[in-house]
Image: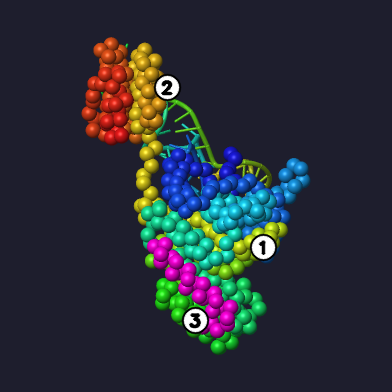
Amino acid sequence: MIERVKGTRDFLPEDMAKRRWVFEKIREVFEAYGFKEILTPVMEYTKLFQLRSGEEVVKQLYAFKDKGGRDVSLRPDMTSSVARLYVNSFQMAPKPIKWYYIANMFRYEEPQSGRYREFWQAGVELIGSDKVEADAEVIALFVESYLSTGLRDFTVNIGDRILLDEFAGMLGVSDDIGLMRIIDKRDKLSQEEFINLLKEFGLGESEIEKVLELVEIKGRPDNVLPLAEELFKSKKAKEEISKLYKLTDLLEWYGVKDWIRIDLGIARGFDYYTSIVFEAISPNELGIGSIGGGGRYDNLIEIFGGKPTPATGFAIGIERLLPILEWKGLIPKPQTGPEVFVIPLKDMEKVAINIAVKLRREKIKTDIELSGRKLGKALDYANRVGAKLVIIVGKRDVERGVVTIRDMESGEQYNVSLNEIVDKVKNLLKR
RNA sequence: GCCGGGGUGGUGUAGCCUGGUUAGCACAGGGGACUGUGGAUCCCCUGGCCCGGGUUCAAAUCCCGGCCCCGGCCCCA
């Protein structure tokens, strides 16, 4: 037997109904915020992604040679393709450019809970503004996207790469990424383990003190931004902190400040982020961490051969969000069965088809008995697949100009004349 | 990439440790009892040991490799 390719999944009708529900909620908000949908090819030249050297995703590329000998890779995220598209054709377009996408991504990793080799992201990119107003717009949309799915129990935690760099500088640490990795782990460790790790990294007493101070800068903006002002002395850091003040002020006016937390320990894995970074967390017992993330990447477009252009964006991981929504019971149970099931009895096939077509033209989900089951079995089947109504088309009725409509839930039956079927069905379906 | 645990009809499982009946059961699916009324009963049928190699008189069972699934590390969505 041929198995599925590792880390990929088949989506069945019920899965698709749930996924579509979530995508539609998110899409509506993206559109309301004035973002326009794009889609780029699922593969790019491998060297496009390799421009982001040093990043983990480059090691995880789903890469291969095509028949023409081209080195190509399936996209590990959308940002590279969007930046390429921008550099190719949109450098002269009016700014900012606001694009969104809902698409599948591929990373060659070992699958585990909440992680697949093919996964889907819904995300946005806002290109051409370095203003904190752009960050606010994007982060507000990020929050609103989750809210649109009915999720309330989550936070969007905001960090800042510039402050982390400044911090590493303050400590005289050259391996700032190494330091960030350790800082990133602090929640999984005890205070003691965390300190030991920092010692192993080569920090002295006073530096460790500072790190502990930094990781305390975590909570509601109003509470923790003053702490950041105390910790950081440099002009560059002060400027960045005032940006964070402005950002949270704007987010209050967007009406989403309740979900915002500052957490200066956030690094995020992508090296292309340059200043404000953020991720969404929703507490759960499913072992799912971040349910989405993003940030500002002001030099990626230049790396891809464009004029230096600031940009910011985020991606929501559907494989992370969906289980949480299901776990919280926020996804409406999809209706998988037909609304109406038409059963023709002996010699009544043509009349039945005629009825089914009329209902289908009204966009009523209608199935018709196709395998010649007898009435008893056909009703059995209708019941199994969850049909709401059954229309029995029998000679005896039709000769009197009627059919029998049976409500499968209540068991009630109605004799309905042939030209009133559509109305009666709509009525019974409460449409 | 590394480390654990797994893989028996469509689904859920028994059998595996300790090799030896025709691989058992339940549900689902198809047909019939039943030529116009289901969620009930009875009967019949379809259909399986992930793939390949090895050990053996004999492999679902033991060994090796591959594929896939579940979970952890790393990393991330």
**Which of the two marks, 3 or 1, is nearer to us in this view?**
1
Chain designation of label 2: A
In the rendering, at what x and y percent does residue A429 appear?
29, 33
- Judge by depth and name the residue closer to the eye, B37 or A77: A77
- Judge by depth and name the residue closer to the eye, B17 or A105: A105
Q: Which residue is mark 2?
A: A371
**Which amino acid is tagged 1?**
Pro
Sequence-wise first label, 3 or 1: 3
Residue lying at 37% horizontally and 59% vertically, measured from the top left = A152
Per the rendered image, the range of residues in magenta is A231-255
**Residue A346 within the segment the image draws in magenta:** no
Give residue A199's quadrant in the image: bottom right
Chain designation of label 1: A
Q: Which residue is mark 3?
A: A229
**Residue A233 within the segment the image draws in magenta:** yes
In the rendering, at what x and y percent does residue A376 appear?
31, 23
Q: Do tag 2 and tag 3 residues touch (Cβ < 8 Å)?
A: no
Q: Do the residues at discs 2 and 3 belong to one chain? A: yes
Chain designation of label 3: A
- Judge by depth and name the residue closer to the eye, A42 or A116: A42
Which labelled disc corresponds to residue A308? 1
